Amino acid sequence: MTRVPWVTLVFVTVAAAVALLPAGAAAFEYDRAAVAAGASWRPFTAQLVHWGTRMAATDLGAVLVLGSVLERRSRRAAVLAMACGLALAAAGLHWLPPPVARYRGSSTIASALYVALALDLGSGARSAAVRGGAVMAAAAFLAKTGFEAATGRALFAGPMPPGVEVLPRAHLLGGLGGAIGWALRGRPPL
Amino acid sequence: MRSHRIQRSRSSSPAAIAATAVLAVAAVLAATACGTTRQLQARSSALEYLYPRGVDARPSADVTLRLPVRVGVAFAPARPAYQDRFTASQKQALLERVAAAFRGRQGIGSVEVIPPGYLTLPPAPPPGRGAPSGGEAPAGDGFVELDRVKAAFGIDLVALISYDQMQFSETGRSSWAYWTIVGAYVIKGEKNETRTLMDAVVYDVPSRALLFHASGNSTIAAAATPVDVDRVLRQHSEQGFETATSDLIANLGTALTQFQQQAATGTVRGPGTPAVAMLGPDGLPAGGAGADGSGAAGAFEMAGAALLLLLALCEKRAAARRR
């Protein structure tokens, strides 16, 4: 329980470093035309970059808190949740309609970690109150993303730059990836 | 241009005649030194080319761009002028510079240089004749020629570059002082200024829609002796075009980025301008409303993260108590 959450720290540090590079966001963002031209890494690296400082602080803050807690409980669960969330979101970003020209944001990873941690606490906690709270948190996430997917409107996302819209499917796929990653962890939480 | 008046002397004595002669010589020297003014101008205008006087301008239509787009870069044709120091080879070299700066940019497939001479100004309408009557095709505008260039070069967009360079040579007051006191050979120099403005407009050829524009400029002022004026002006002309082109390339890059952001909202330049739809190589929309996406954590995720952190701490504390 006292382990340092290296994976989470590395992810957040790299994302913050990319944000400081002058052309970092443009080089790593998802760009449909660039992907078609061969830049196949962009659906994945898009999860590292953001449209602005406020968005970066919120996304990376959520990743830092959720990732640190989950990684201290189970590094394997955290890594698998992040990997599955990243892969599903990247595929959904490129293949699922409606298509987007560009994409940035780490909330997919935050969603994956959120769901994985909620499942971990809900299934592994000895306290009934903790288990109940975790189930409620997971249910709230499901309700929120379900509403967003059904209506196409993002809830509580805050202001976006002109021309940029929040993609509900990113959160939904991230959460699904988190659940799959947690299920694949292979051993009970510590 | 400065003017100088010589007042006639009413006296006719030899002394007065000598004084008048000295004054006249001094005045001529002063006029030569102070008021030598020369202007050289070279210009071409995309406006004159695309929307010539006497031809009805056709309204632009909505734009459909298939990414990556193919762009042609050309100078708007200039009316022949003996003063024009801007040679075809210079134009070709600057077009290559502009093209090279935008090859490989996001959303741009290829950039073709349209050689100078491929575009020609439409003949001016005869005096006294206005626009063609309604319904008659306005064959005189540059878009008709751009349609042919589009087919020949296989381009979607064209970037038309206009230029206007003014070279102004004036002998300044300080050189006048040198002229009158020391003589012509010790003149320190003249004030020569070369001002260059370059402007690029980027059009979608099929829809005749102006997508974006940018300009670059340069001002060069330096001294030169009278015998060197022509050579220096020629050098400054070249240097002016080079510097203005660099400025233009930088501003075009900014304008392109702004256009891409604007186009993502569905219009070319905001409300009231033509709609723009961008299609990817797969034919699917790559632009329009919602073209730029984001996964943004917000208040919900932060509150959820805080709740899960609290639950994890409770669980940890409960486990510690049990031990």
Image (cartoon, coloured by chain):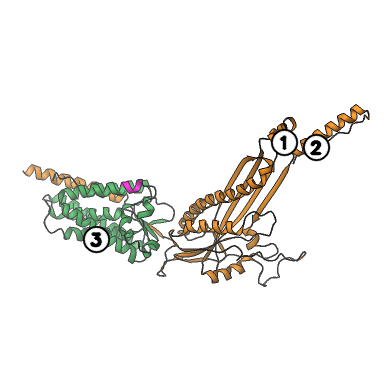
Mark 1 Cα shell of 10 Å, populated few (<14), some (14-19), many (≥20): some
Q: Chain of mark 3?
A: A
The colour of chain A is green
The answer to whether residue B308 is visible is no
In this view, which residue lies farthest toward the right? Answer: B12
Residue wearing tag 2 = B28
Could you say where residue A69 lies in the image, as x and y percent from the top left?
19, 48
Residue A20 painted magenta: yes
* Magenta-tinted stretch: A16-21
- Let me know if marks 2 and 1 both belong to one chain: yes
In this view, which residue lies farthest toward the left? Answer: B323
The answer to whether residue A143 is visible is yes
Measure how far apart labels 3 and 1 are at the Cα level.
87 Å
Image-based side of B171 in relation to A115, left or right: right
Could you say where residue B265 lies in the image, as x and y percent from the top left?
46, 58
Residue wearing tag 1 = B184
User: What's under tag 1, amino acid-wise?
Assistant: Ala
Image-based side of B80 in relation to B155, left or right: right
Image-based side of B229 in relation to A148, left or right: right
Residue wearing tag 3 = A176
The residue at the point 39 percent across, 57 percent down is A165
Q: Chain of mark 1?
A: B
Q: Quadrant of the N terminus of chain B?
A: top right
